[in-house]
Image (spheres, rainbow, N blue to C red):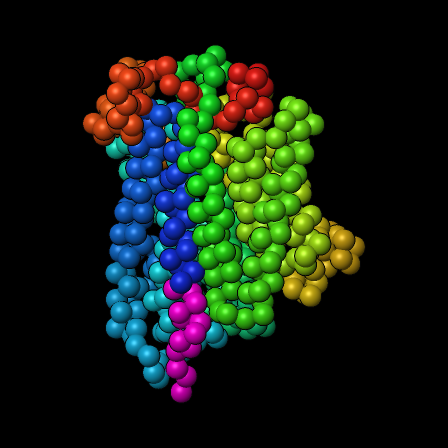
Amino acid sequence: METVDGANAGFVMVCAFLVLLMTPGLAFFYGGMGRSKNVLNMIMMSFSAIAVVSVIWVLYGYALTFGEDRSGLIGYSSGLLGLTDLIDNATFGAVDAESVINTYGLPDMAFAGFQMMFAIITVALISGAVADRMRFGSWLAFTAIWVTVVYFPVAHWVFAFGVAEEGGEAAGFANGFFAAETGGWIVNRLGAFDLAGGTAVHINAGAAALALILVLGKRKGFRKEPMRPHNLPFVMLGTGLLWFGWFGFNVGSTLGSTAYSGLVLVNTQVAASAAVLAWLVVEKLRDGHMTTLGAASGAVAGLVAITPSCGFVNGYGAIAVGVVAGAVCAFAVTLKNRLGYDDALDVVGVHLVGGLVGTLMIGIVGDQTHTLTESLLDGGSAGLLGTQAVAAAAVLAYSFVVTLVIALLLKVTIGLRVKEEEEVVGIDQTTHAETAYDLTSGLGGGGSTTSPGAVRQAPSSTAVSS
């Protein structure tokens, strides 16, 4: 007779709180990077993701993600709709291992709450790409549809550990995790590694952001007007909240307070720090100065990249992941100016590219102690790199194509973009009937069309980089 491990249950629930904190942190991060006339709209997009996704997750999201596996592509268990089976069995004491208890003595309900926060922030990440121009009602509809047909299947592929079909042994971390019988195809059949969501969260959101902005179109004045962050202290505050919450994101994904959790904690911290330094070096060499926005962006890029790899590299590997992510993403955010796509707050440049870096780096600097598989620099084999590349490419392609279809359908039905006059005046006033700043100078507290623009400062801004 097994009982719930109270320490692990408490640990995962605290980590869930930290992951939830990341979304308000993201709201400040994006809000500060945007124009003052749209800051409330950016914050509302993140907070609305919390509301919409939370309800859907309980209704059917958990059932589709962690229900009984269907060919490695999707889960479904009718008893998990509304979390009914979990509520009925969510008690301490002797419980059937298939319903509540797993290897860590963790209640399914605690795990369901933890994973709900992942679904929330994945959707919220996309909002940064569509700043200043997407209708709020269309965003709500997009959130509900996208999380259902894109996030839940992909999360099943990556996070639903189960018993592999051949040999009856798990390809993931443990046998018979939660409700999945055989598990998602990426983790259990392909055997790719992604501890906390480099594919399911960051590549997924980044690819979706690219598809959405291609359908939505460019902001009025893109590459013609300077579009700088209106509140850098907000950006730094948001970065700090994200960095703090990211420990819940990564360390919580170990599902227990163990020595392995300590490895993930240290790797997360050192990779983010290395990425900050790398980004600042690139800025200094390219632009002649180092910016606070560069430091914030570097930190987020490093945190994104270490998300999939935090449990599969050693300290040297974590530093390498951070350095590569910081340098590559610092260049990637300038591609929008060269290629002409309007990724307002660099979701593609940081999350898609950073997620790819972190996922692929497992195959380059992965430590056999943790992967039990040779990487390029630890064993000389390119096999793991190939496996990681297949996982990354599959998620990228699926998310991009399906999001493109969703965006086109919304465009021809309810519409995606605000009217031109609303874009000029600001979405805060025209949609929410509010302004962020009540200034006595008569500038309208953010409604002024002369307020600073929305993306990044001089070294990476459209005006300078174009």
Give the residue drawn at x 35%, y 33%.
42
* Relative to 344, residue 118 above or below: below
Q: Quadrant of the C terminus?
A: top right
Image spot of residue 207 (x, y percent): 49, 37
Which of 121/185 is in front?
121
Residue 344 in sight from this viewpoint = no
Which of 464/386 is in front?
464
* Relative to 164, residue 120 above or below: above
145 sits to left or right of 357: left
397 sits to left or right of 324: left
4 sits to left or right of 137: right
Residue farthest top in this picture: 224
Give the residue drawn at x 40%, y 69%.
10
87 sits to left or right of 170: left
Image spot of residue 187 (x, y percent): 54, 58
- The stretch of residues the image draws in magenta is 1-13
Which of 274/109 is in front?
274
Image spot of residue 242 (x, y percent): 46, 47
Q: Quadrant of the N terminus?
A: bottom left
Give the residue drawn at x 65%, y 62%.
371
Residue farthest front in this picture: 440
Residue farthest bottom in this picture: 1
Looking at the rendering, which quadrant does residue 69 occupy? bottom left
Q: Is residue 164 magenta?
A: no
Q: Is residue 5 magenta?
A: yes
